[in-house]
Amino acid sequence: MKKPEPVQVVKQRRDAALQNLLADVPYIQFLGVQFDRRGDELTAVLPFKDDHIGNPMLPAIHGGVTAAFLEITAIIQLSWEMIWDDVETPTTNVPTRVLLPKTIDFTVDYLRSGLPRDAYARARVNRSGRRYASVHVEGWQDNRSKLFAQATGHFLMPDRSKP
C-alpha cells in the first residue's frame, strides 16, 4: 500500500496553486483581496482601506468595490474548483497558468451599506459544465447571517483542452 503524502506537502501544493490563480489578476492586488483557504473552501477577505469608501458622508464602501470583490470571489472559486482535481493528484504538475472564466453577466443585490471595516465573501458554484457556469456569492462583514451584498453570475468556461 502506498504511503500518503505528508500534510505539509499537500498544503504547499494547494497554496501554490491558489497563489498562481491570484497572480494573474492585478485587480486583486489593487483592491488588496486575500483568500483564506481551508481544504477546498475559500473565503475572500477585503481588508478595509480608506480608498474603498465611495460616500464619505455615511461612510460606505463604494458599490463598484463591492461588485468587483464579489465578482473576483466568484471567478476564483470557479477556477479553484476547475483545477482542484489537478491540484489533488500528486503525479500531476500544479498548473502555473490557468485560463480564467469570462463573465457573461453579473447581477449584484446591495442589501445594506458596506461599513468601513473588513468584508468577507464566499461563492457557491450552482452549475459548472464545459462551456457555462452559474455562481452565487454572498458578502458580509461582522455577521455571516447579515449579508451586505449578494450576487449571481454566469460565466463562459475556458477550453481546458488548450494549453
Image (tube, rainbow, N blue to C red):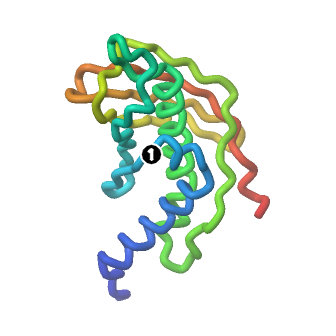
Q: Nearer the viewer, residue 45 or 144?
A: 45
Q: Where is 151 relative to 158, above or below?
A: above
**Quarter placement of the N terminus:** bottom left
Mark 1 closeness class: few <14, some 14–19, many ≥20 residues within 10 Å: some
**Residue 91 screen position, x and y as percent:** 54, 80
Three-letter amino acid code at the position of disc 1: Gly
Q: Is residue 113 visible?
A: yes
Q: Nearer the viewer, residue 116 or 156?
A: 116
24 sits to left or right of 149 = right
Q: Is residue 126 visible?
A: no
Q: Where is 116 relative to 49, above or below?
A: above
**Residue 156 screen position, x and y as percent:** 70, 36
**Residue 105 screen position, x and y as percent:** 65, 23
* Residue at x-position 33% and y-position 33%: 119
Q: Please tell me how many numbered marks the rendered image carries.
A: 1
Numbered disc 1: secondary structure: loop
The residue lying furthest to the left in this view is: 143
Q: Quadrant of residue 10?
A: bottom left
Q: Where is 17 relative to 110, above or below?
A: below
Q: Quadrant of residue 58?
A: top left
**Quarter placement of the C terminus:** bottom right
Q: Nearer the viewer, residue 123 or 4?
A: 123
**Residue 108 screen position, x and y as percent:** 51, 18
* Residue at x-position 34% and y-position 36%: 48
134 sits to left or right of 102 = left
* Residue at x-position 56% and y-position 41%: 75
* Residue at x-position 31% and y-position 81%: 6
Q: Which residue is mark 1?
A: 32
159 sits to left or right of 103 = right
